[in-house]
Amino acid sequence: MINLSKLLFGNAEFEDPLRYGVKAHQKPIIVWNLTRRCNLSCAHCYSDSKAKEYLGELSTKEAKVVAEDLASYEVPVVIFSGGEPLIRRDVFELAEHCRVLGLRVILSTNGTLISKNVAEKIKEVGFTYVGISLDGVREVNDRLRGVEGAFRLAVEGLKNCRDEGLKTGIRFTLTKRNYFEVERIFRLAKRLKVPRVCFYHLVYVERGSGMVKEDLSHDEKRKIMDLIISRTEDLTGRCILSEVLTVDNYADAVYLYLKLKERGDERAEIVYSLMRKHGGNSSGVGIAAIDSQGYVHPDQFWTHYSLGNVKKRKFSEIWEDESEPLLKALRMRKLFLKGRCSRCAFLELCNGNLRTRAEVTTGDIWAPDPACYLTDKEIGIEY
């Protein structure tokens, strides 16, 4: 995640030590997909979730054992995701168990199931943040999410969380079908007094694998970044939003740095320094995923590659296994990157971006990430 508000204004948030602190021996943030089942059918879903039961999902007892290991291993954050995590009948029992163990737990949800009573329960069991996914306003969102009325229900969920005093945010995935909605999302966040907006770049896996051609062109990405940066400077500067973030494309950090440098802004070097400490994409290092059946992945997009299963080995043991070939390679990735990624002057800011996008489009996990929209000249390989 790239916190544009932090980079532009120095806003301090809980996650700052994780993003800009010492990386040695860093324990990963865990994306825990508690269930694959979902009441929506989003076009870009990275787990191809459907409204049906899936066999083999972790039982309550098994999930509690996993939580105990995560707490003992001292992971900093656990993100309950899915599918739709609120569909699991024991989601609040598991969240409370995590809280008692000292784990910080975040909820990633489509928001459609958050009634007033559910919002009260979310607060009661100790979720510290609720990220609600919206892919546009009204019918634009509903078309991408596959269910009519999903927008109305998600907005109600946002309001109910806000009214309970929960920290909330909007999560928006950029595609050709909705990128024109960015300005309306900013206006919605302002109207609802939602303090945080996250813009996700498309990752083409699972159901989203059919959306490769739906990704924005490089020119479209640049124009959208110009808009997002401009609105961040305005709305964060006026204390209307506390955080605007972009996710899953570290070209954004370099683009911001170059933009500030070009206009002579003194914060350019601060941005560079902070993003150097951040270190770019950390799949297999600073982030991990556990799916509903207990399989461990380098991040939530590596669903096709299992590092092991928590039903057989503790997560901590799987993550510390230095003989695992993909984990070992990801932790030394600069040695394996190919093409323009290997020669990029800003590799220490990006770390090669998302390897899953490279694999989907080329068959080679070390090929350049096609979502990088920076020119060869900008990254110092054309003179």
Image (tube, helix red, strand yellow):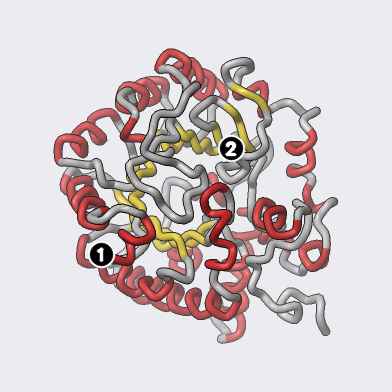
Label 1 neighbour load within 10 Å: few <14, some 14-19, many 20+: some
Visible residue check, residue 245: no
Q: Is residue 90 above or below residue 40?
A: above
Residue 113 placed where, x, y %? 24, 41
The amino acid type of the residue labelled 2 equals Ala
Q: Is residue 186 above or below residue 310?
A: below
Secondary structure under tag 1 reads loop
Query: Residue 276: horizontal and vertical position, in percent?
Result: 66, 59
Task: State which mark lies toward you, 1 or 2.
Answer: 1
In which quadrant of the rendered view does residue 318 lie?
Answer: top right
* Residue annotated with mark 1: 138
Location of the C terminus by quadrant is bottom right
Residue type at mark 1 is: Arg
Q: Residue at x 66, y 75 (%)?
A: 374
Which residue is denoted by mark 2 in the rendering? 288
Q: Nearer the viewer, residue 183 or 11?
A: 183
**Residue drawn at (31%, 59%), measured in percent from left and top?**
142
Establish if 56 lies above or below 262: above
| Residue 159 relative to residue 297: left or right | left
Q: Quadrant of residue 107?
A: top left
Q: Is residue 355 left or right of residue 147?
A: right
**How dense is the environment of label 2, judged by Cα within 10 Å: few (below 14), some, or many (20 and up)?**
many
The alpha-carbon separation of the residues under discs 1 and 2 comes to 33 Å
What residue is at 56 percent from the left and 42 percent from the top?
300
Q: Residue 11, position in %: x, y? A: 41, 60
Question: Which residue is painted at 67% across and 60% down in the image?
Answer: 350
Q: How many marks?
A: 2
Give the mark nearest the N terminus, 1 or 2.
Answer: 1
Front position in the image: 57 or 379: 57
Q: Is residue 14 visible?
A: yes
